[in-house]
């Protein structure tokens, strides 16, 4: 089912259907401030496995988790470093994903995370509203592995068809670049895992030149 988020009645029904679908461990497609994402309940191992299978990925590629607030970061991360909050203060909500050590007491299975979790607060009103109601969502870019990420709902529907229960249409995305991913698990250093919508120069301006390590 596709719902046009620019129409109030469809938005309300779409949100209701999305919550129900997520509660049944189903998959949804939702807009973000980067590209469209395919999402699942982060605490449902069944749903996360379905998400990875829909994209054609294995457990070695765990999905990031979208969150509604810094309080959620504190709850999901194990002693997050101060630099995480410095970056979040500058770039969240926005196109920045932070890899931190996961809280060891959490009952979830996102794949082969090696004890970490990748978190982001997206800058999209529809998605933030949904996150505030349903909690953290495992969300990966809406595409099949090796294909371009969907920047409109039509492309997402082509990729996933009936594998996804609800499609929330927020219109064409303003960017075709994914989020920039930083690994903060090495104390005191910021490892750039992927350069996306935010540049390395922007990151260095916040944390300092010497703290940033760029992956080969």
Image (cartoon, helix red, strand yellow):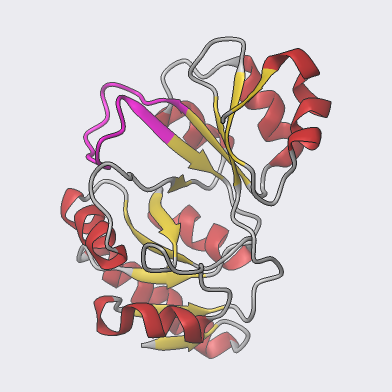
Residue 174 pos. (x, y %): 71, 70
Q: For residue 5: magenta?
A: no
- Kindly identify the residue that appears in the image at 75 percent across and 42 percent down: 199
Q: In which quadrant is the C terminus drawn?
A: top right
Residue 203 pos. (x, y %): 74, 32
The outermost residue toward the front is 216
Give the magenta-colored segment's residue range: 100-117
- Kindly identify the residue that appears in the image at 48 percent across and 62 percent down: 130
Q: Is residue 45 left or right of residue 131?
A: left
- Quadrant hosting residue 165: bottom left
Residue 121 pos. (x, y %): 58, 46
- Kindly identify the residue that appears in the image at 33 percent across and 45 percent down: 61
Q: In which quadrant is the N terminus drawn?
A: bottom left
Q: Main secondary structure of the magenta part?
A: loop
The outermost residue toward the top is 187
Foreground of the two, 170 or 156: 156
The outermost residue toward the right is 205
- Report the label total: 0
- Quadrant hosting residue 143: bottom left
The outermost residue toward the left is 46
Residue 197 pos. (x, y %): 69, 51
Q: Is residue 107 left or right of residue 100?
A: left
Q: For residue 107: magenta?
A: yes
Q: Is residue 80 above or below residue 127?
A: above
- Kindly identify the residue that appears in the image at 65 percent across and 72 percent down: 173
- Quadrant hosting residue 192: top right
């Amino acid at each position: 089912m596709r719902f046009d988020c620019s129409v109030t009645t469809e938005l309300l029904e779409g949100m209701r259907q999305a919550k129900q679908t997520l509660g049944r461990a189903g998959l949804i497609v939702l807009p973000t401030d980067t590209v469209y994402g395919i999402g699942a309940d982060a605490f449902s191992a069944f749903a996360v496995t379905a998400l990875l299978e829909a994209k054609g990925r294995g457990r070695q590629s765990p999905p990031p988790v979208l969150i509604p607030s810094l309080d959620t970061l504190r709850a999901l991360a194990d002693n997050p470093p101060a630099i995480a909050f410095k970056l979040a203060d500058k770039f969240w909500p926005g196109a920045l994903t932070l890899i931190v050590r996961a809280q060891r007491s959490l009952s979830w299975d996102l794949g082969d995370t090696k004890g970490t979790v990748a978190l982001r607060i997206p800058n999209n009103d529809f998605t933030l509203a949904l996150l505030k109601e349903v909690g953290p969502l495992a969300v990966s870019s809406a595409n099949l592995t090796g294909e371009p990420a969907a920047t409109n709902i039509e492309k997402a529907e082509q990729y996933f068809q009936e594998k996804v229960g609800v499609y929330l249409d927020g219109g064409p995305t303003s960017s075709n670049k994914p989020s920039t991913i930083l690994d903060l698990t090495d104390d005191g250093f910021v490892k750039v895992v992927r350069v996306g919508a935010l540049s390395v120069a922007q990151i260095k301006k916040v944390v300092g030149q010497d703290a940033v390590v760029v992956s080969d």
